[in-house]
């Protein structure tokens, strides 16, 4: 493994690990706040128990996310010094604001965790809401910084110099809204389905049924609403990418030849040498509609893009198919769940519906990981799209492969620690709130 591949692999590992905790940190406090609100309004003890149990999970993920996020910030400077040398002054504002949001989140979480029976009950609830709002803001600000890499703005690039810097324009670049919207909804989908799946599994085991049923309902409604909205944000993102990054869209769909009424590819195995896709289902005109809202529009293929600027088609295409496939499965489960709420109430106690949620527990996070693979690998070979190549930004220091192996061991160890802590927390819930 050469140092360039090792540096990219280490960033991919760090981001892939951190993004799970980011999603949970953005969303889980809202679940907690809803449960807390129900307790304040109904005085049902089960909602207080749910709130306290979830708050401990939030604390675990907050601490782990803080560690993994700090590592990412250091890696940007250590692994990609040429990138940060030029990019830091331009897109540093969202990172600075994210730090502020993080500190607000930490303070509010401290108030919430240690404020039981010490604060006014509604002020205590409000601190939990602040945890969610600041966590959500933190995630959006980081996504805005990443969006700048896909749609650089806020500077003039003249003779290799970055001039006339405007940090506000850089932060609110053309990609920030579509990426932030898509990522925010994805966080609600993935966290909602993960939490609902865990509680569905516990209901199937017959443990603390009332506690887990209340928990399942809150998480499932959040996750299912988001899963139904997600294709709308995906459509906005696809149309945006078609205009700004045609190479990424072409790689996502393994679209080798520029054509009108371009077909949407489902599945398939891309063959980059022969420029074709084998074993795929093709829907004529649907890629044109997805990209431009018109079944007849022309969609740029990889034949219009210099080969040295092609992303790795296979990786991007497979990741995109996984993301869409997982999203469609969760949307189908969501429609069934809302049908059960509306017309078929007896389904809500059925084992088959709970089993579907239990099986779908990891689907949201699989989709998130695949989506970030599309975003990052689809931008290659650029670290700043159209401006700076990734290979030109990497550190000249040798031995990055050893750093990658070390960080892999650290992250694997951290994953086992988090799993152990969550398992212990679930067992503790069983002892404390057994009904």
Image: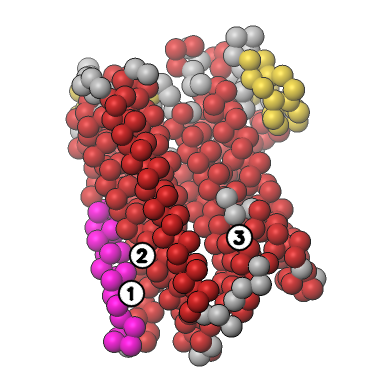
Given contact means CB atoms under 8 Å apart, are the residues at marks 2 and 3 in contact?
A: no
Structural distance between the alpha carbons of marks 1 and 3: 25 Å
Please give the name of the residue rendered at 39% of the width and 79% of the height, measured from the top-left corner: 125
Q: Tag on residue 197?
A: 3
Please give the name of the residue rendered at 53% of the width and 83% of the height, measured from the top-left corner: 46
The percent position of residue 318, horizontal first and vertical second, equals 60, 30
Q: Is residue 65 left or right of residue 369?
A: left
Q: Tag on residue 113?
A: 1
Residue 32 in sight:
no
The residue indicated by pointer 2 is 59
| Count of numbered badges drawn on the protein | 3
User: Which quadrant of the figure has residue 346?
Assistant: bottom right
Q: Is residue 147 left or right of residue 95?
A: right
Label 2 SS: helix
Q: Quadrant of the N terminus?
A: top left
Please give the name of the residue rendered at 21% of the width and 21% of the height, measured from the top-left corner: 397
In this view, 131 is above or below 311: below
Label 1 SS: helix
User: Which quadrant of the figure has residue 292?
Assistant: top right
Q: In the rendered structure, which segment of residues is drawn in magenta?
A: 97-119
Label 3 SS: helix
Q: Is residue 94 left or right of residue 198?
A: left
Please give the name of the residue rendered at 33% of the width and 75% of the height, measured from the top-left corner: 112
Give yes or no for residue 380 being in the magenta stretch.
no
């Amino acid at each position: 493994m050469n140092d360039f591949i090792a540096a990219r692999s280490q960033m991919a590992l760090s981001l892939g690990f951190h993004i799970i905790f980011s999603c949970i940190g953005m969303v889980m406090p809202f679940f907690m706040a809803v449960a807390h609100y129900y307790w304040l309004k109904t005085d049902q003890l089960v909602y207080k128990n749910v709130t306290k149990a979830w708050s401990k999970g939030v604390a675990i993920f907050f601490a782990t996310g803080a560690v993994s996020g700090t590592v990412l910030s250091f890696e940007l400077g250590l692994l990609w010094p040429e990138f940060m040398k030029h990019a830091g002054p331009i897109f540093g504002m969202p990172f600075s604001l994210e730090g502020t949001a993080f500190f607000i989140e930490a303070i509010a979480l401290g108030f919430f965790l240690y404020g039981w029976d010490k604060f006014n009950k509604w002020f205590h609830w409000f601190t939990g809401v602040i945890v969610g709002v600041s966590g959500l803001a933190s995630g959006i600000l980081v996504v805005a910084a990443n969006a700048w890499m896909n749609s650089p703005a806020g500077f003039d690039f003249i003779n290799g110099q970055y001039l006339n810097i405007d940090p506000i324009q850089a932060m609110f670049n053309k990609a920030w809204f579509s990426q932030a919207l898509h990522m925010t909804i994805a966080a609600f989908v993935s966290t909602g389905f993960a939490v609902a799946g865990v509680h569905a599994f516990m209901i199937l085991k017959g443990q603390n049924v009332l506690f887990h049923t209340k928990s399942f309902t809150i998480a499932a409604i959040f996750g299912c609403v988001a899963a139904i909205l997600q294709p709308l944000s995906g459509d906005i993102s696809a149309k945006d990418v078609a205009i700004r990054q045609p190479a990424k869209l072409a790689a996502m769909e393994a679209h080798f030849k520029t054509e009108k009424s371009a077909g949407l590819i489902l599945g398939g195995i891309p063959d980059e040498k022969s420029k074709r896709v084998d074993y795929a289902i093709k829907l004529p005109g649907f890629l044109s509609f997805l990209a431009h809202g018109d079944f007849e529009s022309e969609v740029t293929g990889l034949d219009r893009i210099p080969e040295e600027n092609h992303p790795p088609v296979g990786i991007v295409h497979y990741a995109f198919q996984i993301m869409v496939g997982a999203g469609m499965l969760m949307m189908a489960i969501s429609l069934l769940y809302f049908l059960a709420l509306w017309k078929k109430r007896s389904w809500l106690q059925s084992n088959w519906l709970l089993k579907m949620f239990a099986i779908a527990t990891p689907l949201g996070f699989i989709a998130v990981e695949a989506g970030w693979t599309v975003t990052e690998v689809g931008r290659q070979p650029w670290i700043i799209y159209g401006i700076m190549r990734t290979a030109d930004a990497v550190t000249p220091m040798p031995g990055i492969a050893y750093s990658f192996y070390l960080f892999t061991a650290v992250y694997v160890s951290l994953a086992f620690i988090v799993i152990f802590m969550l398992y212990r927390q679930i067992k503790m819930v069983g002892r404390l709130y057994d009904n």
